[in-house]
Image: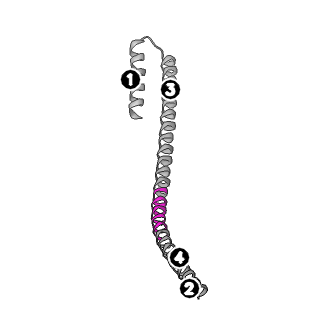
Amino acid sequence: MKRIIKVGAVLGLSTVLLASCATKGDLENLRTEMNQKINALEGKVEKNANAINEAKTAANDAKATADEVKSEVAALKEKVNENSQKIDTVNAKVDELSQKIDTLSNNINDLLQKKYRK
């Protein structure tokens, strides 16, 4: 910002030196004009600084949200793995019970056939 002011001052002084026949009124007009330009530039710089700060805040908020989502996804993956293992265990038990039922069914059929043969 100081650099902008310095540039404005240099431009103003250069104009004054080049127009050495300028009157006091001309100098005041030039000073007023330069001050207006400097103020306009300062306003733009401030506006840009505010926009940058807002963008930084938005980026930080987005990063925080992304970090939360990553944590939730990791927790969900862990739950999925746990549930998958439980499902595998249940499926193994179902297969085991199915085999036992088949064995019992065969035994019952064998007993019934022996009973009817007699």
Residue 110 placement, left or right of 11: right
Compute the Cα span from label 1 to label 3: 13 Å
Check disc 2 and report the residue beneath it. 114
Which residues fall within the magenta stretch? Answer: 69-86
The residue lying at 43 percent from left, 10 percent from top is: 21
Please identify, in this view, whether the residue under mark 2 or under mark 1 is nearer the observer: 2
Please identify, in this view, whether the residue under mark 4 or under mark 3 is nearer the observer: 4
Compute the Cα span from label 2 to label 1: 119 Å
Check disc 1 and report the residue beneath it. 10
Do the residues under discs 2 and 4 have CB atoms within 8 angstroms? no
Where's residue 59, x and y in %? 47, 47
Find the residue positioned furthest to the right. Answer: 116
Residue 104 against residue 66 in the figure, above or below:
below
Compute the Cα span from label 4 to label 3: 94 Å
Please identify, in this view, whether the residue under mark 3 or under mark 2 is nearer the observer: 2
Find the residue positioned furthest to the front. Answer: 118
Residue 28 against residue 81 in the figure, above or below:
above
Do the residues under discs 1 and 4 have CB atoms within 8 angstroms? no
**Mark 1 / mark 4, whichever is N-terminal:** 1
Q: Secondary structure at mark 4?
A: helix
Residue 102's label in the rendered image is 4
Residue 37's label in the rendered image is 3
Whether residue 76 appears in magenta in the rendering, the answer is yes
Compute the Cα span from label 2 to label 4: 18 Å
Compute the Cα span from label 1 to label 4: 100 Å
Label 1, residues with CA under 10 Å away: few <14, some 14-19, many ≥20 = few
Residue 24's label in the rendered image is none
Q: Secondary structure at mark 3?
A: helix
